[in-house]
Amino acid sequence: MFSKILIANRGEIAVRIIRTCKKLGITTVAIYSEADAEAPHVKLADESYLVGGPRVNESYLNSDKILEIARESGAQAVHPGYGLLSENAGFARKCEEAGIIFIGPSPEVIARMGSKIESRKAMEEAGVPVVPGISYPLADVEEAVQVAAGMDYPVMLKASAGGGGIGMQVVSNEAELRKAYEGNQKRATDFFGDGAMYVEKYIANPRHIEIQLLADKEGNTVYLWERECSIQRRHQKVVEEAPSVFLDEATRAKMGASAVLAATSIGYSNAGTIEFLVDEEKNFYFLEMNTRLQVEHPVTEEITGLDLVEQQLLIAAGETLQFTQADVKRQGHAIEVRIYAEDPKTFFPSPGTITTFHTPQGEGIRHELAVSERSVVTPFYDPMIAKLVVTGANREEAIVRLQKALDDYVVEGIKTNIPLLREIAAHPAYLAADTTTAFVAKHIQKK
C-alpha cells in the first residue's frame, strides 16, 4: 500500500478521500487554490500546497504544477477524485511518465471512453446493447438531417466529447435539428475542444440506471449492484438511490453482466461505472462509461458495506480483489441528495458566506461536506457544497429519514436547493418510485 498520496481535487471529495487514507495510515497531500486557502480539505490533510490562482485553469487543472507538487512532496500516487482531471487521459499519461501512479484506469482506456462515439464502437464490438444511432462523427448538418430522417423523430443530437448535457439536445423535426446543430457544435468545441457530433434515437421516459464496477489489474471484475439516478436537472443528477425498485432480479443480473462485459472487453482496471438508459419495457442501453469514482458512490457503500476509495487504493497498489461476485451482498436502501449553492427556482449559482450551517444527525444519516459555518462559497467552482445520504431497512424507511433530515437541514447566508429537495422527497410520484429523467420538468418546473 502507498505511504503518501496527493489528492488532485477539492471540496467534499477531497475530504472523503482523506478520511479513508487516515483509516489506512496513508499520509495525504492536499492542493488548494488561493480561493480555497481556508477550505476543510486543506486543514484536514497532513500536508497542503498552494497550486495557483482561484480559477480552475490556474489551479486544479494545472497538471504540470500538480505533478511538481507531487514530486516535491514525495507522493507515490495521485487520486483525482471526480471532475477536474479525473477523466483527463493526458494527465494520467503525465503521471505515468513521471513514475507516479494515477489512481484510475490507463490513459488509453480513459481516452477511448471519453469519446462517446469511440465508447459506442467499443460497446458494439463487445456485444453490449447501445442506443440505436450512429457511431461516427457527422460531417455537417446535411448529413445529420439525412441520418435523422432514417431514424424517425424525435432524436438526440449529441456531442462526442465532454458531459453535463453540454452539446446535447432533443430535436423533434428537421427544422429543430438544423437550428440546434451549429449552436451545440460550437458549445462542444468551446467547452471540450472537440466539435464532433452524432445522432441517436431518443428514448422516451427513460430511467438513468448505472452499474458500479471494481476491476483489478489481473482482470477480475465484479459489479456492486446499481444506482438509480433518474432525477436530474439540466442533465445533472440531483437524487440517487440504491437499489432501483424499478428493476427485477433478472434485469438486474443482465445489466450487471453487461457492465462486467463492457469493462473486461476494454481491459478496465480500478473503480468505474457503466451508465445505462432503461426504457419502460426494461430494455437497457449503454449510455457512457465514467472512468472514475462517482459523486453518488456513497449509496453503493451503504448497501454493500464496502469502502470504494479503499478499494481504489488497493487496486492501484497492485492488490487483487479479495472477494468474488458471489460475495457482494446488498442490504437495505440508500438515498443521496446533492445540496447545491443555487437558487432552487432558476438553478443559478448563489455564492456568498454561509452564516449558519446546521446538519441533521441521527440513525441512518451520513454527510459528505465541502463547507462549514463561515465558509465562503466562491463563484469559481461547482456549486455543490454537500451530500446528504440516508439509509433504511427499505425505501420507505429511507424516505422518512430523508424527509426529516431535509426539514432539519439549515443553511443561511446563501440560497440552496434544499427547498427543491424537500419538494421532491414529498412528491407522490417520488413516493411511488415514478422517477424518470423527466421528473423535475414534469412535476416540479411546470408548477
Image (spheres, rainbow, N blue to C red):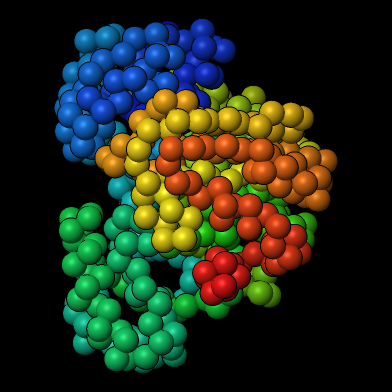
Residue 371 point in image, percent of width and height? 45, 29
> Which residue is drawn at the image coordinates 37% and 91% (left, top)?
173
Left/right placement of residue 337 relative to residue 31 reads right
Q: Residue at x 47, y 19 (%)?
A: 18
Q: Quadrant of residue 177?
A: bottom left
Res 413 seen here: yes
Compared to residue 283, the image places residue 265 above or below, namely above
Which of the two residues, 265 or 304, is positioned nearer the viewer here?
Answer: 304
Q: Is residue 118 visible?
A: no
Q: Is residue 160 left or right of residue 302?
A: left
Left or right of 405, for residue 272? left
Tag count: 0
Quadrant assignment for the C terminus? bottom right
Classify 19 as above or below 423: above
Task: Give the image location of residue 310, x and y in percent.
Answer: 55, 23
Q: Using the rendered view, name the quadrant where residue 174 is placed.
A: bottom left
> Quadrant location of residue 87?
top left
**Which residue: 46% across, 10% down?**
26
Q: Position of residue 335 (x, y in %)?
A: 66, 45
From this view, report whether residue 270 is shown above or below residue 156. Answer: above
Residue positioned 65% across, 64% down in the render: 435
Q: Nearer the viewer, residue 392 or 115?
A: 392
Q: Position of residue 81 (x, y in %)?
A: 41, 33
Q: Is residue 202 left or right of residue 391?
A: left
Image vertical order of residue 445 relative to residue 95, above or below: below
Of residues 172 and 224, which is closer to you in this image? 172
